Amino acid sequence: MKETPSDMIQEISSSKLKMNLISKNSNPNNNNNPPSRDPSLINNMSFAHKPSGQRGKNSHNLEINYTSNTNDNNIPSTSTALLQKVVDKADILEIEIINSLSMSSNLKIEINALGMIQGSKRQAKDGLTFFGLIDENNIFDTNDKKDVDYIINTNEVITEENSNILGRHFCIRFDINTMKYYIKDLGCGYGTFKKIAKKAQIKDSYLLNIGNSYIVCTFGVDEYYPEGMVIPEGNKTLNIKVFSEIAQTEPHFFNPKQFKRIYIGRDISCDIIIDDSLLSRIHCTIEYDDEEGWIIYDGKIDDDESKNKLSTNGTWLYLIEEIPIEDGLIFKNNKNAFECRLINRNKK
């Protein structure tokens, strides 16, 4: 997909998403034993806007803190011997850098069942490929964070204050049972987000990024559903909290008995209006479906399909959960946008 908006990088880099993981049972600086993130704990996140000068560009940081008492976020690996048996049968995953301020665009990274095909720094051949940022000059005490396959370059000067971005940012894993590749954010750095191509079912505590703004979706109850009443998750009231450079109101509550469609954008006609110059007039649409629950679409969705229109800069979902990589998947990490292609070995 070469028709990438020219201002995508501005949209990616204008806000810095910092994730600090704290676990009582693990060392948060140890990427070999990373702390877990229980999605239910997102209700307890602390969000802090930190002014840094010029409005509209690098104007604030959004800081997210997860707290967990358990550690269930280990990435499973597979023995090299088993992976060798299927490597010639598995698709090759080709990842192209389609937009970046610090890395060469059109650079392609190839991954097979064993891991990164060329240039891996770990050379582990365990079906895992870790992307991250390391302290190449050994200035900081980050020896336990050097174990990455691919270094995501950045134009930032690493200091003691921002050294928490050193480490593994996300992982791509090959699963020998499904013969598929999976991707997951690892809670270090600025977060890894996938671009919503068609639609996505909203789950409790989902984090979305649109323009310079972030949206947290949770499910709750209101006067329609008395406390203590057992309700399927998808039928619960949708609570939306917006975090943007412009102060927002209290959470928005949408009950499926009242709302079937919700528009979010900068137009005054939207149900949630966000003053963000990087948003489209109608940037994304949320609908309620009796079978699927709450669904989010990028852009405007209308009863008249001829009026449907995608947003300019996309709607992005934080990869708190491991998801399968589909052909054409676009994801971003910090100032970099990537596109995935699955190549059948027999057709290459």
Image: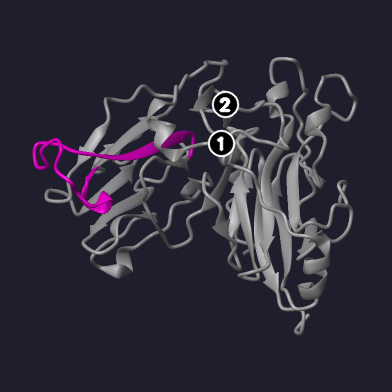
Which quadrant of the rendered structure holds the C terminus? bottom right
Query: Residue 35 placed where, x, y %?
Result: 60, 33
* Extreme residue in the bottom direction: 346
Neighbor class of circle 1 (other Cα within 10 Å; few <14, some 14-19, many 20+) is many
Residue drawn at (79%, 38%), measured in percent from left and top?
Answer: 153
Looking at the rendering, the stretch of residues picked out in magenta corresponds to 211-237
Q: Is residue 6 visible?
A: no
Residue, disc 2? 23
The answer to whether residue 225 is magenta is yes
Q: Which type of secondary structure does the marked residue at label 1 adopt? A: loop
Q: Nearer the viewer, residue 346 or 179?
A: 179
Residue drawn at (78%, 44%), measured in percent from left and top?
Answer: 103
Question: Is residue 167 positioned above or below 248 on the image?
Answer: below
Residue drawn at (65%, 71%), measured in percent from left and top?
Answer: 179
Question: Is residue 344 positioned above or below 324 on the image?
Answer: below
- For the residue marked with disc 1, what is the amino acid? Ser
Residue 268 horizontal side relative to residue 109, left or right = left
Q: Residue 36: which disc? A: 1
Q: Is residue 106 visible?
A: yes
Residue drawn at (74%, 54%), measured in percent from left and top?
Answer: 128
Asked whether disc 2 touches disc 1, contact meaning CB atoms under 8 Å apart, the reply is yes
